Amino acid sequence: MPGEDRRDIGRLFDEVPALYDRVRPTYPDELFADLVSITGVHEGSRVIEVGCGTGQATRSLAALGVSLTAVEPGPDLAALARQRLAGFENVQIETSTFEDWNDQGRHFDILLAAASWHWVDPSIGWPKAHAILRSGGWMALIGNIVVRRPGEPEVYAETADLHERYFPGNPQWCHPPLEDDVRTTNEGWGEVEDPGPLFGPTIVRWYPVVQWFDGAGFADLLRSTSLYRRLDPEMRERLLDAIAERIRMQMGDRASRRYLGVLRVGRRCG
């Protein structure tokens, strides 16, 4: 994905900051407990978060008492994050892409990106991350991967015909991967480009997460994702209305979205 495409797609979330904040999954307390255990982060540690969105992960980081700088390119997302985090004096939110962000000579103990590093141009992002981390500092990527379990009702399986009816031949329509298959991907940095020798071997931890929605709520969840926001708006709404109706009529108006939360941590080399 070319760098400009990454930025353009990433900006789609700035169209719906309140919706994004309401429906997107957060991260379990166990993940941050493991982050502390692995990295030794403590009150006063200097942390930078890249792509903080509306602050779902930022709130958990701020509660650790760290000195936190959060960088977010979407002005409306950043504005909502500032509202949500107004009670934390240890948090500073700066509006910029990470590629253009001015570090002003600052250095950090940890760089964390929550479901955002894939929007950063890797040719700039990885070297810049290495440069602003102190010797022995840590890179941490966290996220939620949509998964399914065999034999368990799953929304895409129940609505594949609707997806093909409204947007036929879209190569991105597919069933989520099986949870057990995802758990085998416990090396490296996941689906982002590898940083090469800049960072050491990763430590990977998994965390099951489930959200439950009625039909209207599940349609709102899909509205908050880049895959659906990129669609023609009029046809997207017809598709999402049809999905909501299918959930109401054939799934008892109760549908789950299953995830594996993931923490990938590696130490700065050199």
Image (cartoon, rainbow, N blue to C red):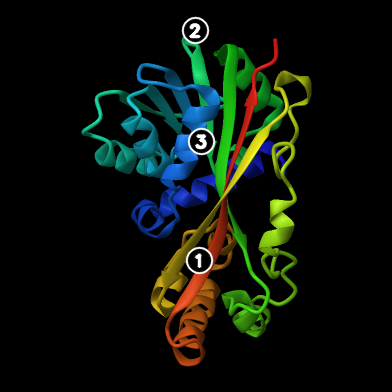
**Does residue 131 appear left or right of residue 168 in this picture?**
left
Image point (55%, 75%), residue name: 235
Amino acid under label 2?
A: Gly
Image-based side of 54 in relation to 178, left or right: left
Report the amino acid beneath label 3: Asp
Considering the numbered disc 2 on the image, is that residue within a helix, a strand or a loop?
A: loop
Is residue 234 visible to us here? Answer: yes
Tell how many labels.
3
| Residue under label 1 | 222
Describe residue 28's horizontal placement relative to residue 198 as left or right.
left
> How far apart are labels 3 and 1 at the CA level?
30 Å
Above or below, 146 relative to 120: below
- Pointer 2: what residue? 105
Residue position for label 3 = 34
Residue 182: give its label: none
Dot 1 falls on a residue whose secondary structure is: helix
- Between the residue at mark 1 and the residue at mark 2, the CA separation in whole angstroms equals 40 Å
